[in-house]
Amino acid sequence: MMPGPFELIIILVIVLLLFGGKRLKNIGGDLGGAIKGFKKSMKEGENDKIDSKDDIIEAKVVKEDKKAKK
């Protein structure tokens, strides 16, 4: 159940009394910067994906002979 407009106004007044206008503004700016950074990193991550099979390197594991080392 969604709160009505009257309840939202009461919640806003309580938040303003608890945090104050200046601190609330700083929190909003920090949150916006964090969201912007997250979106930027998500876009950069999409560009790092492998597009073709040519970029895949095949390799095989070879057992090391312990006697030959000594």
Image (tube, rainbow, N blue to C red):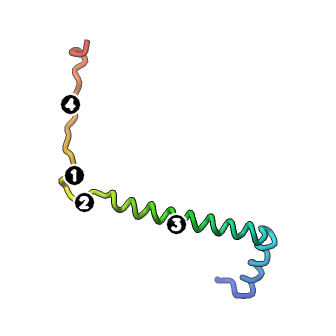
Which of disc 3 and disc 4 is earlier in sequence?
A: 3
Q: Amino acid at mark 1?
A: Asp
Q: Which residue is mark 1?
A: 55
Horizontal placement of 69 versus 33: left or right? left
Q: How many labels were placed on the picture? A: 4
Horizontal placement of 23 versus 53: left or right? right
Label 1 close to label 2 by CB (< 8 Å): yes
Give the mark toward the camera: 4 or 1: 1
Q: Residue at x 78, y 70 (%)?
A: 20
Judge by depth and name the residue closer to the eye, 6 or 30: 30
Could you say where residue 25 lies in the image, as x and y percent from the top left?
A: 70, 70
- Disc 3, SS: helix
Q: Amino acid at mark 3?
A: Lys
Disc 1 and disc 3: Cα gap in Å?
A: 31 Å
Which of disc 2 and disc 3 is earlier in sequence?
A: 3
Judge by depth and name the residue closer to the eye, 41 or 59: 41
Q: Quadrant of the N terminus?
A: bottom right
Disc 1 and disc 2: Cα gap in Å?
A: 8 Å
The crowding category of the residue bearing disc 2, from other C-alpha atoms within 10 Å (few below 14, some 14 to 19, many at least 20), is: few
Label 4 close to label 1 by CB (< 8 Å): no
Give the label on residue 51, or none: 2
The crowding category of the residue bearing disc 4, from other C-alpha atoms within 10 Å (few below 14, some 14 to 19, many at least 20), is: few
Judge by depth and name the residue closer to the eye, 1 or 4: 4
Disc 2 and disc 4: Cα gap in Å?
A: 29 Å
